[in-house]
Amino acid sequence: MKLLSADFFNRDPRRVARALLGKLLIRKTPRGILAGRIVETEAYLGKGDEAAHATAGKTARNFVLFGPPGFAYVYFIYGNYYCLNVSCLPDGVPGCVLFRALEPVAGIEQMARARGISLSEIDFRAPVLRDPEPPQPVDRKKLAGLRKISSGPGRMCEAFGITRARDNDKSLVSARSDLQIVDDGYRVRRVLVGPRIGITKSAAHPLRYLIGGNPFVSRP
DNA sequence: TACATGATGCCCT
DNA sequence: GGGCATCATGTAG
């Protein structure tokens, strides 16, 4: 398990978004460790990316995007949900990667509770993906309960208890942080690229990255 | 299975 | 006051 460093995030968000696929997002809680494999990300750039929050310049809401790399930018959306990003590029240069979906790896019962999902909905014998993907054809019905935990940016934040008050402007690269990203050696075989989800401006750019064949993405 | 819709609150103009 | 990097639920097919 190797903690990702600030250097990892100190580069173009498009390269970070791709490199984050297959890494583990970790949350240390009093009740145990939560972990999910990153299977879907989106890059948001600085000037020129009309869909990025940084496009309007630095504000009280988005200041983290303009800070040093490796910090959590958490924002509240649609009156109900939070979304987690990590800042990229050097101090003063905006850019980030949005975490869109995780494959549940550890702390599944705690995450299900946080999401309001009954444990009876989850088939713990379902084939959770292991290195290398993709496995034999997946029975999506058996994965339905697991998929509800973190297959979407709002869902994964709820599962991890991520909120703006708790986590915005928090370092993800500090050994003391309760929110980290680690490399466990998992090798991603195939990366797919496509247009970002849920935006209207600058919608055509292929800035969404996902692990090919992984059933835990928000959508194929 | 696919699509449309309502809920909901904060930020920025 | 408008718009939003979403989700769960309902209806139609």
Image: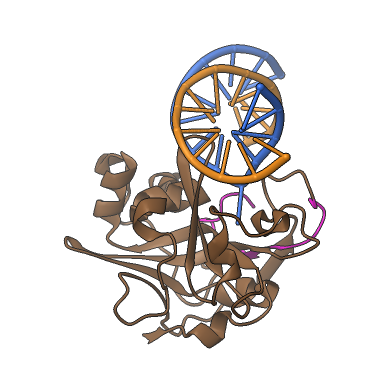
Chain colours: A brown, B orange, C blue
Tell me what residue is drawn at x 32 percent, y 49 percent. A123
Seen from the viewer's position, the closer of residues A60 and C6 is A60
Q: Which residues are magenta?
A: A202-220
Secondary structure mainly formed by the magenta segment? loop
- Image coordinates of residue A44 in percent, x first then y, are 67, 62
Tell me what residue is drawn at x 77 percent, y 59 percent. A49
A142 on left or right of A213? left
Does the magenta segment cover residue A66?
A: no
Can residue A91 be seen by looking at this rendering? yes
Eyeballing the image, is A49 above or below A91? Answer: above
In the picture, the quarter occupied by the N terminus of chain A is: bottom left
Eyeballing the image, is A69 above or below C7? Answer: below
Q: Residue furthest left?
A: A31
Does the magenta segment cover residue A203?
A: yes
- Image coordinates of residue A199 in percent, x first then y, are 71, 46
Give the total of numbered labels: 0
**Rendered image quadrant of residue A126:** bottom left
Seen from the viewer's position, the closer of residues A55 and A193 is A55
Tell me what residue is drawn at x 65 percent, y 69 percent. A94
- Image coordinates of residue A219 in percent, x first then y, are 61, 49
Eyeballing the image, is A175 above or below A122? Answer: below
Tell me what residue is drawn at x 43 percent, y 53 percent. A156
**Rendered image quadrant of residue A213:** bottom right
Seen from the viewer's position, the closer of residues A8 and A36 is A8
**Rendered image quadrant of residue A177:** bottom left
Can residue A136 be seen by looking at this rendering? no
A83 on left or right of A30? right
Seen from the viewer's position, the closer of residues B9 and A13 is B9
